[in-house]
Image (spheres, helix red, strand yellow):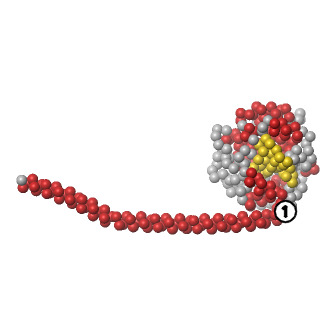
Amino acid sequence: MIDFRYHLVSIVAIFLALAVGIVLGTTLLQEPAVKSAQELTAQLTKTKEELRAQIDTLQGREAGNDSFITSVTPDLVSGDLAGQRVLLIETPGSSTAARESVQQVLDQAGAEISGRVTLTEKFLDPKGRGVLDGLVNQLKPVNMVFPATTTSWDRAATLLASALVTTDQAQGGTPNTAAADVVSTFETGGLLSTEGEVTKRATLAVMFAPEKAYEGESAETQAGALVSVADGFDVGGMGTVLTGMAATTALPGDVISAVRDEGEVSKRVSTVDTVDMPLGRVVIVYSLREQLAGRAGQYGVGKGASAAMPVETSATPSPTATSGS
């Protein structure tokens, strides 16, 4: 009985000691752990407040800069595009608000807006290439010959550009006799819509990229189709600027990135990826001036941009700048 009681007491003592140890250990560790967590929380809260203050400061400065640029924009662009007619080209997914803002600045620069062409999703549909080719073959002049390597959109862009823009300043504002048939046929086919006097030829074009990169299996093809359009109008006129907003990541369906990645096209077509900023809209005007001088550039803050804006803004066309930029 004594041995049994001894062992029983010993076992109880052991478990009691373990329990006391756990309690004491938890109690002793609890205060440092809680204190450490409280200190970390306080530090994170402080850091968050500091970052929030920095963001507020930056946003305030940005708003102030935007307000200033907006107020002086008429002086910055006054007369820069006097005597030029500009065609606006909207694409599926582009921003109406951006187009309206750009149009206002173009007006302030003295440009005359010839009208607006809005491309439809059907125009970009890879499954509709046969229809596109059929219309081009039906409408193109006999002397319009395409290289064997051209795509359906290359050919369509060349035809549309020949009807809507010109490389001859003297022909700006004059109608192309074939323009009405080309435009009406493309409209009837659901490939585009127009507004304004687009058949009275423009000298320059501003094209608006989609707000978001195209997605899906046809994304790269659709972006490539719009690259063809921008290039076609640049070659057919005195210059083209593609504008939109900088993409946060490089995607196959991003049109501005597609132009910048296309070596030969990027030598002709200018891009501006800050259309959502007042400064960006001024840069569009300066880029058009640069196009008139036979040069091109990639401007903004996104991938592939070489600078925020052109260094040289002289609008004096070079003697050889008569067939696109």
Q: Could you tell me which secondary element the residue under label 1 belongs to? A: loop
Q: Going 86% across and 58% down the picture, which residue do you hit?
A: 110
Quadrant for residue 282, please give it.
Answer: bottom right
Q: As shown in the figure, which amino acid type bears the numbered disc 1?
A: Ser
Q: Position of residue 102 (x, y in %)?
A: 78, 55
Q: Going 82% across and 57% down the picture, which residue do you hit?
A: 106
Position above or below: 161 against 274: above
Residue 260 seen by the camera: no
Q: Position of residue 247 (x, y in %)?
A: 66, 51
Q: Which residue is under mark 1?
A: 78
Q: Going 63% across and 50% down the picture, which residue do you hit?
A: 249
- Residue 64 versus residue 240: which sits nearer the camera? 64
- Residue 75 versus residue 259: which sits nearer the camera? 75
Q: Outermost residue, left direction? A: 1
Residue 91 seen by the camera: yes
Q: Is residue 156 left or right of residue 201?
A: left
Position above or below: 288 against 231: below
Q: Going 16% across and 55% down the picture, which residue do you hit?
A: 11
Quadrant for residue 150, please give it.
Answer: top right
Q: Position of residue 270 (x, y in %)?
A: 77, 52
Q: Position of residue 126 (x, y in %)?
A: 71, 35
Q: Is residue 26 left or right of residue 196?
A: left
- Residue 293 versus residue 10: which sits nearer the camera? 10
Check disc 1: other Cα within 10 Å, few if <14, some if 14-19, many if 20+.
Answer: some
